[in-house]
Image (spheres, rainbow, N blue to C red):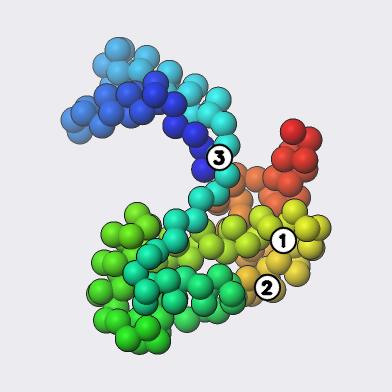
Amino acid sequence: MIGISELMYALVRRAASWYDQDFLEPKQERIAAVLLDEIVQAPLEPLHLPMPSEPRLLRIANAILQCPEDSRTLDDWAAWAALSPRTLRRLILAETGLTFAQWRQQARLTHALEMLARGDSVAMIADALGYSSPSSFIAMFRRAFRDSPGRYLATRQEK
């Protein structure tokens, strides 16, 4: 996750107003270049895991946090909490701003970062989070943080 500066927010709002075009005008190209510079320079923010307050959602969230390797589907979790899948989708998005899959991914990433900080091996973390192999965990980690778990931790420890 990166921090969003006021300038970056304004640039994104400006770019969002551009209509479907094959090519950017020179002014738009300059704005896009500044936006890219801002993204590159943006500080990394700690991962945030919004917790739901609705009792059935909180029960699901706590169960996932206790056992992040649990691979039950949204439908399975909905049945477990006496919700319809549609209600679970709607409630989790309304309460956390994330889809169920995004929330579970954030929960796993949070857990992974805690385990990395403790010095656990990538293989141990992959197993604890329910990944089929260390390489599948590393691929997910790279998608989220644009770095391998080892390098991510090393750069954080240098700061």
Residue at image location 49% in from the left, 56% down from the top: 49
Q: Residues within 10 Å of mark 2 (few under 14, many from 20)?
A: some
Q: Earlier in the sequence, mark 3 or mark 1?
A: 3
**Residue 59 horizontal side relative to residue 9, left or right:** right
149 versus 13 height, above or below: below
Q: Given contact means CB atoms under 8 Å apart, are the residues at marks 2 and 1 in contact? A: yes
> Of the residues shown, which amino acid type is indicated by label 3?
Glu
Q: Give the image quarter of residue 21.
A: top left
Task: Give the residue pinned by disc 1.
Answer: 115
Q: Residue at x 35, y 18 (%)?
A: 31
Q: Quadrant of the C terminus?
A: top right
Residue 39 sits above or below residue 148 on the image? above
As helix, strand or loop, the secondary structure at mark 3 comes to: loop
Disc 1 residue type? Met
Gap in angstroms between the C-alphas marked 3 and 1: 18 Å
Residue 32 in view here? no
137 horizontally vs 107: left or right: right
- Residue 128 at x, y = what percent? 68, 73
The image shows residue 76 at horizontal and vertical percentages of: 40, 84
Question: Residue 102 at what x, y percent from top left?
Answer: 43, 60
Residue ID for mark 3:
45
10 Å crowding of disc 1: few (<14), some (14-19), many (20+): some
Residue 78, position as x, y percentages in the image: 35, 81
Q: Secondary structure at mark 2?
A: helix
Kindly identify which residue carries mark 2.
Answer: 128
Q: CA distance from mark 2 to mark 1?
A: 9 Å
Please, what secondary structure does the residue beneath circle 1 have? helix
Instruction: Name the residue rendered at 57%, 64% in the picture.
Output: 108
Q: Which mark is residue 79?
A: none
Q: Image check: 113 left or right of 26?
A: right
Which residue occupies the foreground of this view, 119 or 30?
Answer: 119
